Image: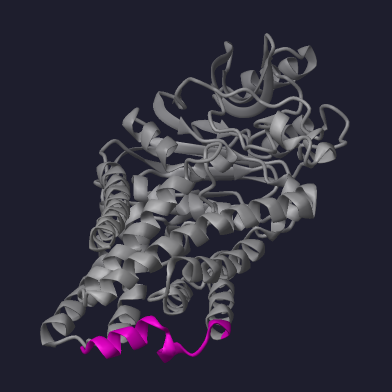
Amino acid sequence: MSAVRVRSLLRHEMRMDALVRLITAAAAGGVLTLAFEPVAAWPLAFAALALVAWATLGVGFWAATATGFVFAATFWLLHIEWLTMYLGAVPWLALGLFMSLEWALGLGLAGWFVRRGMARLAHPALLAALWAAVWVAREALSSRVPYGGFAWGHISWTQSYSPLLSLSSWIGLPALSGLVVFVSVLPVCWMLTWRFPRWRAWLGGAVAVAVWALVPAWGSVTSAQGQLRVAAVQGNANAGLFSNETPGTILRNHLDAAEAVVDEDFDVMVWPENAVDLDVLRNASARAAVTEFVDRMGRPLVLGSVTTRGDDVYNSVIVWLPGVGPTQVYDKRHPVPFAEYMPDRWLWRPLAPDLVDLVPRGFSFGQASGNLDVAGVNAGVLICFETSDSDLVRGLVSGGAQVILAPTNNADFGHSDEAAQQLAITRAQAVAAGRSVVNVSTVSSSAIIDAGGAQLASLEDFTSGAMIATVPLHDAWAPSQLMGPVVEVGALLVAAGALVQRAALRVRRGRTASDQR
C-alpha cells in the first residue's frame, strides 16, 4: 500500500466525518445492549464490536476516546437502567458514566495503538489481536478497581446462551471475551488496511469455523463425581434493603414455601440471601422458628440472614443442622459499594448527602472462604453480585468446591432486567468453572444449572415455591481455572508493553528533534 493511501486512511477520509462515527458508535452501543439479557441475541455482540471498531480504529487517541465514550454511554445507560428502581437517576448516571469513561479510555488506547500499527503496515490479524488484548486488559482492571470493580458488562456474558460458551471451560472467560472481540474486529482491520486475505488466511478461517461448529459437542470439560439432591426455596418476599415489611414476614414467607416440599426426597435445602429478615443468630423468635423447622425436616438448611458480631454487621449465609443448630457461617467478602456499604464517605457525602445517608452503616467484609461442608459435600457459596467476581469463583474451585450455591436477593430491582442478567452471568460462570450452580432468589430468577449450562430446574418469577433437582458434583479442575488468570495477565502485559513502547518512541523522537536544532 502506498504512503498516500495510508495517510488517507488515517485521516478517516474513507469513513466520512466525525459525526458519522459518533452516530455509528451510539448505534453500536444500542446493538450491544441487545446481546445481553433480556433479548440475549448473542450474535449481535459481534456486530456491535465491529461497528465500534469501524468508528474508532485509525483515529487519534482523543478522537477514539470521545467516540468510544458515546458507544459506552449508550450501552451502559441502557444496560443498567434497572438501577433507577433502587436509588433513582443519580446513582444510575454516576455508575453508567464512570463505566463509560473506563471503556472510552480503553478504546482510546486501542485506537491509538492500532493507528500506529496501520502506519507501519502491520498485519491486520496483529492489529485485531492488539485491540482484543487491550479490551481484555480493560475488563481485567474494571473487574477489580475501584472498590472491587464492576464486571456486569463483560463481553463473555453475551455468550451465556451461545454455543461458544462451552469453549470457556477450556480457555476461560477472559479469553472468550478476547476471542469474540478479535473475530469481530478482524474484518474491520482487513478493510481499513486494504489488505485482503490470501488463500492461507481463508483456510485458517475455515478451520476456525469448523472447530467452532464442534464446540457444542465438547460438552462439560469435567466429568461428574457423585450427586446431591437439592431443594431450593423462593419465598417471593419483599426483601429489599428498604423494605417496610413487619419483622419476621420474610422468614414466614420462606417457611411457608418450604413446607410444600418438606416431605420430598432431597439431601439439603437452600434459601436465598436475606431469607431471614431478623438476625437469626441473636433473635430468639427467628432462631426458634428455624430450629423447629430444621429439626422437623431432618436435613441441613442453608439460609441467608444479616448477622451482627460485636460492632460488625455481615451479609451472611449459615449452615443449620437438625438437632445441632448453626454450624458454619460465610460472610459476604465482596459487598456492593454504595449499596451494602459506603466507601470513602468523606469524599462522596459532600456531593450527594441525601443519597449517601441512605446507607448509614455498611456491611463489614467477610474474611473466611466460602467453602462450606454441606451434607458431606464441599459447597462453595457466592452471595448475589459475587457471582460476577471470577476471582471468588476460582477461589472456591481451588478450595475444593464440588458445587456452587448462589443465594441472591433481587427484590430491590422489581420486574426489571437485572435478575435475568445475573442469571446469565451465573450460567457463564457455571460452565467456565465446570461446576453446577444453585441460583436461588427471593423473587427472581431462580434456577439450578449444571456444569454444561443445562437448566435442571427453575421457578417462575415473583411466585412462591420450591424447586428440587439432582445436582451433579465435580472434583476436577477445568483448564479455565489456570487459563483465565494467565490470559488476563498476558493481556495486561501486552497493553502495558505497547504503552511503554509508544512512550519510549515519543521520547526518542523528542531527543532526535532536539539534537537537530
- 113 sits to left or right of 348: left
- 68 sits to left or right of 397: right
Where the N terminus falls, by quadrant?
bottom left
Image coordinates of residue 72 in percent, x first then y, are 56, 65
* Residue 145 falls within the magenta-colored stretch: no
Residue nearest the viewer, comparing 123 with 81? 123
- 451 sits to left or right of 509: right
- 387 sits to left or right of 517: right
* Residue 15 falls within the magenta-colored stretch: yes
Residues shaded magenta? 1-19
The structure residue drawn at horizontal position 35% and vertical position 53%, both measured from the top left corner, is 174
The structure residue drawn at horizontal position 40% and vertical position 27%, both measured from the top left corner, is 377
The structure residue drawn at horizontal position 64% and vertical position 35%, both measured from the top left corner, is 273
Image coordinates of residue 49 in percent, x first then y, are 44, 72
In the image, residue 433 sits, relative to residue 28, either above or below, namely above
Where the C terminus falls, by quadrant?
bottom left
